[in-house]
Amino acid sequence: MTDTLATSSSVASARSSRLVTAIPGPKSEALHKRRIATVSEGVAATFPVYAESAHDATIIDVDGNEFLDLTGGIGVMTIGHTNEAVVAAVADQAEKVTHTLFAVAGYEPYIRVCELLAEHTPGTFAKKSVLVNSGAEALENAVKIARKHTGRTEVAVLHHGYHGRTNLTSAMNYNMHPYGTGFGPLAGSVHHAPNSSPFHDGLTGKEAAERTIAYLEKRVGASQIACLVVEPIQGEGGFIIPAEGYLPALLAWCHDNGIVYVSDEVQSGMARTGAYFASEHFGIEPDMVTSAKGIGGGMPIAAVTGRAEIMDASHPGGLGGTFGGNPVACAAVVAVFDEVKKKSLLKEADRVGAALTRGLNGLKDCFSHVADVRGIGAMVAIEFCDPETGKPAPEVAKAIQTYALHQGVLILTAGTFGNVLRFLPALVITDEQVDEAVAVMADALETL
Ligand code: PLZ
């Protein structure tokens, strides 16, 4: 242990001040019984606790236990739970109008959200948006629009990607299980090409791009491809950051071949990485960006934003849905953009990322199972491998997650092999809270 890591006794005292029952407590257990009777088993239950309230980076469960939330509801609560400005905007809008269906009778907040997205997504060209309800729905629409625009059918995605749980997006995910198993036939015309992951493949961005492009040209044919859909930092895949030059090479190839480049920023977007959208870190201006999660500050909303001429490819009535761009959710998005500016959250993402990276690198120095620490801004992950064999060690990630839960800290796993812990905390989390979470992980690793 180095002195950068907190001791067991400080962890124990922080724990005792937060947790008031065994985990799960009796009220959570009672809710879990009711859940088992009526909620489909197809819906996962990562943690056995039920939330009563939440604020900033903490969640209080129905038994009064306080949890430090490093999951941010899988990257949604970027500005923090129950942010005052978002709560006020939602309440205010709810009193004015909660629904008309934008295609029936429009309202200003929808238009304002499209203006904000045009302004804050990469590229200064004219942009338009369509608003929908979920990340997966945004991806569905991006593909539809790209197909209509190009008159082509094929869709290219990358190994270790994740794009949703609808029929098309399940086909676009790298992992068949749990997303596709038994749910087929999944949508066709989806092609999975090798990605860039310098920690795993040792390739330069140029080499990895050549490999991706060679696959797509030989196996699919560039002239057949409507769009290439890429997460700039792969989220569910384990926070995989491509090698330098990889994404610009893919974008250039797309443009040389009339392929629409779609950046899936559902997880990496909206201030998470210290930029509004992570594509900025790689110097690329995608033709289309999908956003969701963090833009709504907890309200369900998603968007496809892209070059105006591409976004206008659909005939009127071809895009939309009953709830897409709901006025209350739109009011929340406007408040989120406002708060990001007011609270300098792009800078805060860098502060949180620095605190996390410092702490996790401290773990790397002490524990041989830590293979890699990586991230940009407040999108940070730690990967565990067996030091003898170099093989993924998902049991270590799982054991730390379980240990942390019982210390009042919620951490998510990730990675195709489940051997990654990822951190998507609210950008208002304090350095002390980050240090506390890292200390719990250190304790977990020591007891393993
Ligand atoms: N694209 C890059 O990360 C959602 C999934 C959580 P939806 N990721 C979290 C779960 O277990 O369902 C995601 C993503 C990227 C698309 C999506 C899909 O977004 O809002 O969940 O549909």
Image (tube, grey):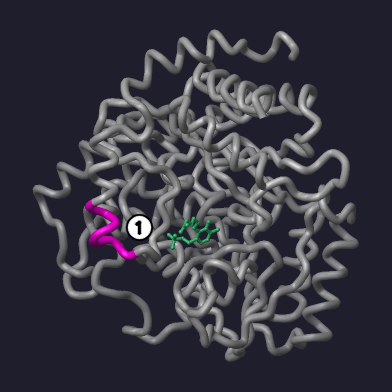
Residue stretch in magenta: 34-40
Q: Is residue 190 left or right of residue 120?
A: right
Against 267, residue 207 (above or below) is below
Q: Position of residue 66 (x, y in %)?
A: 35, 25
Q: Is residue 273 left or right of residue 20?
A: right
For the N terminus, the quadrant is top right
Residue under the point 30% across and 66% down: 324
* Depth check, front residue: 214 or 182: 182
Against 140, residue 392 (above or below) is above
Q: Is residue 409 left or right of residue 43?
A: right
Q: Is residue 137 left or right of residue 253?
A: left
* Depth check, front residue: 267 or 337: 267
Q: Which residue is mark 1?
A: 301
Give yes or no for residue 37 being in the magenta stretch. Answer: yes
Q: Is mark 1 within 8 Å of ligand 1?
A: no
Q: Secondary structure at mark 1?
A: loop
Q: Callout 1: 10 Å neighbours few (<14), some, many (20+)?
A: many
Residue under the point 21% across and 44% down: 90
Against 421, residue 102 (above or below) is below
Amino acid on which the number 1 mark rests in the picture: Ile
When asked about the image quadrant of residue 420, the answer is top right
Q: Position of residue 207 (x, y in %)?
A: 90, 62
Q: Position of residue 238 (x, y in %)?
A: 65, 50
Q: Position of residue 244 (x, y in %)?
A: 81, 50
Inspect this view and state whether residue 83 appears. Answer: no
